[in-house]
Image (cartoon, rainbow, N blue to C red):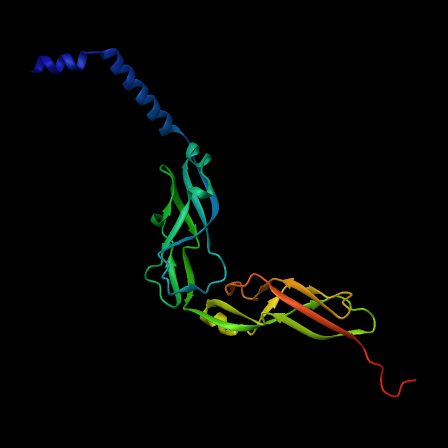
């Protein structure tokens, strides 16, 4: 048995020693490689967002991540490689605080999280709400001298909006993009997009509306010559 072990250890001894030397050189090279630091701003990702809740926080959360690691690892590191992840499966309506921990951030092997700013996020959630609101046309431009606008019609006159409940309740009307009525005599129709002033409240199922502007000539004042 001992002879078999000796034979196995001494067989191709030169190749084995060469392989061992190469492995040690590679380890020594990596071990001696200087480390560096990198700071990057990356968006925070959210998993398991409850279907019956919507974000009521307007700003898209970002985190500043300081990463340390070997130069060859950081050299090829991109923002797409760093992912702060927060699990929202237990979220409820209202404000809640979520810590951003190093173990919640995915980084390549060899890299290490040094610092996270902010260390926690304050998020707000609300139940969704839909309701109908009138559409108000924004008319701009200079009319022909002696003419005035008598009627502005919007088709459809109302649209459905959708968003966090508290924000939706504050919306009195949806607005059109500016409609230039310069030079309109009689009537003219325009196609315009419609939106709300709250970035978290969207207009549902309406791509554009039709705005009709009607003008007429000012009548002469009674008693004038």
Residue 188 x, y percent position in the rendering: 71, 67
Q: Is residue 218 left or right of residue 225?
A: left
Residue most toward the bottom?
223
**Quarter assignment of residue 51:** bottom left
Residue shown at the point (51%, 73%) measured from the top left: 132
**Quarter assignment of residue 88:** bottom left
Q: Nearer the viewer, residue 77 or 23?
A: 77
Q: Is residue 110 above or below residue 93?
A: above
Residue 166 x, y percent position in the rendering: 47, 72
Residue shown at the point (37%, 65%) measured from the top left: 52
Is the C terminus in the top left, top right, bottom left or bottom right quadrant?
bottom right
Q: Nearer the viewer, residue 57 or 208?
A: 208
Residue 176 x, y percent position in the rendering: 62, 66
Q: Is residue 97 above or below residue 218?
A: above
Residue most toward the left?
1
Q: Is residue 123 left or right of residue 148?
A: left
Q: Is residue 17 above or below residue 70?
A: above
Residue 55 x, y percent position in the rendering: 44, 63
Residue shown at the point (26%, 15%) measured from the top left: 17
Residue 103 seen in render: yes
Q: Is residue 28 above or below residue 80?
A: above
Residue 178 seen in render: no
Residue shown at the point (49%, 74%) measured from the top left: 169
Q: Nearer the viewer, residue 125 or 108?
A: 125
Q: Is residue 89 left or right of residue 177?
A: left
Is the N terminus in the top left, top right, bottom left or bottom right quadrant?
top left
Q: Nearer the viewer, residue 61 or 33?
A: 61
Q: Tally the numbered discs.
A: 0
Q: Is residue 171 left or right of residue 96?
A: right
């Amino acid at each position: 048995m001992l002879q078999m072990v000796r034979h196995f250890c001494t067989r191709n001894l030169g190749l084995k020693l060469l392989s061992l030397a190469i492995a040690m050189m590679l380890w020594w090279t990596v071990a001696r490689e200087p480390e560096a630091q990198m700071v990057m701003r990356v968006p925070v990702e959210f998993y398991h967002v409850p279907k019956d809740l919507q974000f009521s926080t307007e700003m898209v959360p970002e985190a500043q991540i300081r990463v340390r690691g070997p130069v060859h690892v950081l050299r090829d590191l991109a923002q797409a490689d760093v992912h702060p992840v927060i699990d929202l499966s237990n979220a409820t309506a209202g404000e809640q605080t979520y810590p951003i921990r190093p173990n919640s951030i995915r980084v390549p092997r060899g890299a290490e999280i040094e610092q996270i700013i902010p260390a926690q996020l304050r998020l707000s959630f609300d139940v969704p709400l839909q309701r109908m609101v009138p559409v108000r046309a924004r008319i701009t431009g200079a009319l022909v001298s002696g003419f005035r606008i008598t009627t502005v019609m919007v088709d459809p006159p109302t649209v459905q909006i959708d968003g966090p409940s508290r924000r939706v309740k504050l919306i009195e009307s949806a607005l059109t993009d500016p409609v230039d009525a310069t030079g309109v005599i009689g009537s003219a129709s325009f196609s315009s997009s419609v939106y709300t002033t709250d970035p978290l409240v969207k207009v549902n199922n309406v791509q554009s509306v039709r705005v009709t502007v009607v003008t007429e000539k000012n009548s002469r004042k009674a008693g004038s010559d």
